[in-house]
Amino acid sequence: MDQRLFRSVGLLVGGALLALGCGGSNSTPSCTPVSGKAEPFPTLDAWCQVSMVGGDVVPNPGVTPYNLNTPLFSDYAVKRRTVWMPPGASATYDGENVFTFPEGTVLTKSFGLPDDVRKAQPVVQWVETRVMWLTGGEWHAVSYTWDQAQTKATVAPGGGVYPKTIIGPDGSTLDAQYLVPQANQCSQCHASNSVTTLIGPKARNLNRDLTYPDGTTENQLAHWTRLGLLTGAPDPSAAPRLPVWNDPSTGTLDQRARAYLESNCAHCHSPGGDAKNSALFLSTFVTDAYSYGVCKKPVAAGGGTGNLLYDIVPGQPDASIMVHRLGSTDPSVAMPQIGRSVVDQAGLQLIEDWIASLPGSCP
């Protein structure tokens, strides 16, 4: 894999990006980065994208927040996402793939660990904010870790592990070992055919309402279009939409389970992803049941199979490798391989229920 596409330090960001105002698209900059830097900024605030306000990571004026219908599970982390594009620039709509973003785009994703998942308003310890930016036609990324005072985030190219005790949804105590990825680990997920790429900003995951900082609620595709951040998008009613994995009102059991697998697994389990050699492809656009695991024998999973024969055995979740791996925290077994240290019990139950509902049998 070409790791230079995802290097975190020593990166020539380029004068055009470094001269960007940070207020957001079609807005007056609220601050200006120091120019002439030859590496990512040492602190997050220099990007001028987000700020810590009242214990929450919020977008700066002109920076657009966004959310996903079904996000990746990350040790129950609370997440905040933003996007900024240079004034007058816009992304190009794509009905299946990640949008094509303009040169100079900056995205952030902040992760905070709650004290108690059961609380509507948990106490959140913010751990990191990841920044991805497009310059010279290539995506680059770096993580910034927040200090204990929750006032400053500093560049962390080497990543790290942050222990946190969390009360889970069933009231049990979970000892999470939250991972801030270093460069090679980032590329494990954010690479397709060895080229760094985005994962989340797809039409089907953005096609949802969001309440914005000014209090208004609007469909995200319509909002981006209205602001000039997106061109070529149809009316949201004509765009694809992933269901919310844990909301039965948004889709069938099959649709919600497939959405969960896409968001948690398909970035690797795709023809260009890190797990392409497995021939197990988990995008919701894959319609062949064998390709997404039904009665499919693993190509090379070693001990990760738990001595089971098939990825998915219809009607038998306990006989399915997929359930075995999603339910494990053993590094040699667990899937996804990085990004979680505890089991998503509700997500696991969804996949178990889905497999139990599938008709047929394996040889």
Image: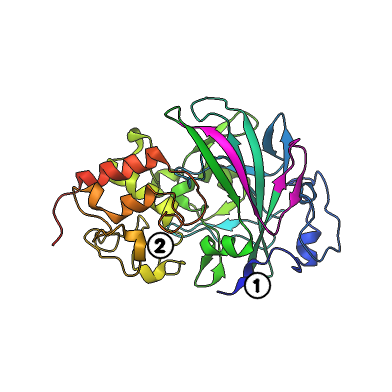
The x, y position of residue 66, in whole percent, is 57, 43
Amino acid type of the residue that numbered disc 2 sits on in the rendered structure: His
Residue 8, located in which quarter of the rendered image? bottom right
Could you tell me which residue is drawn at 19 percent across and 51 percent down?
314
Position of 36 relative to 151 (above/below): below
Counting residues from the start of the chain, the first of labels 1 and 2 encountered is 1
The x, y position of residue 82, in whole percent, is 63, 46
Question: Does the residue at mark 1 contact the one at mark 2 (Cβ under 8 Å)?
Answer: no
Label 2 packing within 10 angstroms: few (<14), some (14-19), many (20+): many
Front in this rendered view, residue 163 or 108: 163
Q: Which residue is mark 1?
A: 4
Q: Which residue is mark 2?
A: 269
Is residue 81 shown to the viewer in this render?
no
Could you tell me which residue is drawn at 28 percent across and 45 percent down?
254
Front in this rendered view, residue 313 or 224: 313
Amino acid type of the residue that numbered disc 1 sits on in the rendered structure: Arg
Label 1 packing within 10 angstroms: few (<14), some (14-19), many (20+): some
Mark 1 → mark 2, Cα distance in angstroms: 23 Å
